[in-house]
Amino acid sequence: MLPFYDHATDAFTDEELNRPEQYCDGLPLTKGAFNNQLPGGQSDNAIRSTQTAAIQGMPDIRWFFERLIGVVRTFNDRSYHFDLRGLFEAPQFLVYRDSEGGHYDWHLDRGREAPRKLSLTIQLTDPSRYEGCELEFNVGTQIISTPKGRGVVVAFPSYMVHRVTPITSGVRKAIVVWVTGPEFK
């Protein structure tokens, strides 16, 4: 049985996270979209309230993503053994704010084009700077929370049902990456 998630606390140092965070802080943010039909006329905000930016054309932080490929390989070799093909979607910078009721309710990470196989979240914010905003998995009758900490990288199969609980104070920033591959058979 595959693990629900895997994580690393030492993939990036605090200093190494400063450059991508500063780069991302300069990107124009837009409201995070929810790409599925909503039952009963629910608004997007009922499902997702976050600000996002696609991370494209990143020569200043190319080293970060080259290193991230190594992190992906480590997770995949250790825990998943998926047939992975690469990062075909731009990584996403996410900002959850208490003033906006930041959250992302239960969902799967489905791709629009190439199938997403492995999802990764890189936490940029020290947990002492916010409350709530837990990354959780729904596993049958159990809800499992992941470790928190600046630089913690959490990897999980993209088909896992997960959410980010509402942030109750502060601001949380993260980078999300999806690794694609052929459909599961």
Image (cartoon, grey):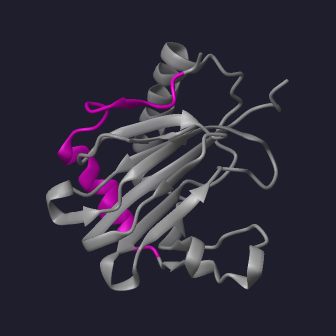
Quarter of the figure with residue 81: top right
User: Is residue 132 visible to the viewer in this orientation of the structure?
Assistant: yes
Quick check: 124 left or right of 178? left
The image shows residue 52, relative to residue 153, as above or below, that is below
The image shows residue 12, relative to residue 71, as above or below, that is below
Q: Quadrant of the C terminus?
A: top right
From which residue to which does the magenta span run? 3-27
Residue 107: where, in percent of width, then height?
A: 62, 55
Q: Name the one closer to the observer, 41 or 8.
A: 41
Spot the residue most to the front.
141
Residue 67: where, in percent of width, then height?
A: 42, 33
Whether 135 is among the magenta residues is: no
Q: Quadrant of the N terminus?
A: top right
User: Is residue 62 visible to the viewer in this orientation of the structure?
Assistant: no
The image shows residue 135, relative to residue 156, as above or below, that is below
Spot the residue most to the left.
128
Residue sitting at x 48%, y 79%: 28
Whether 9 is among the magenta residues is: yes
Residue 6: where, in percent of width, then height?
A: 43, 28
Quick check: 69 left or right of 22? right
Quick check: 19 left or right of 182? left
Residue sitting at x 14%, y 58%: 128
Residue sitting at x 41%, y 50%: 135
Residue sitting at x 42%, y 38%: 154
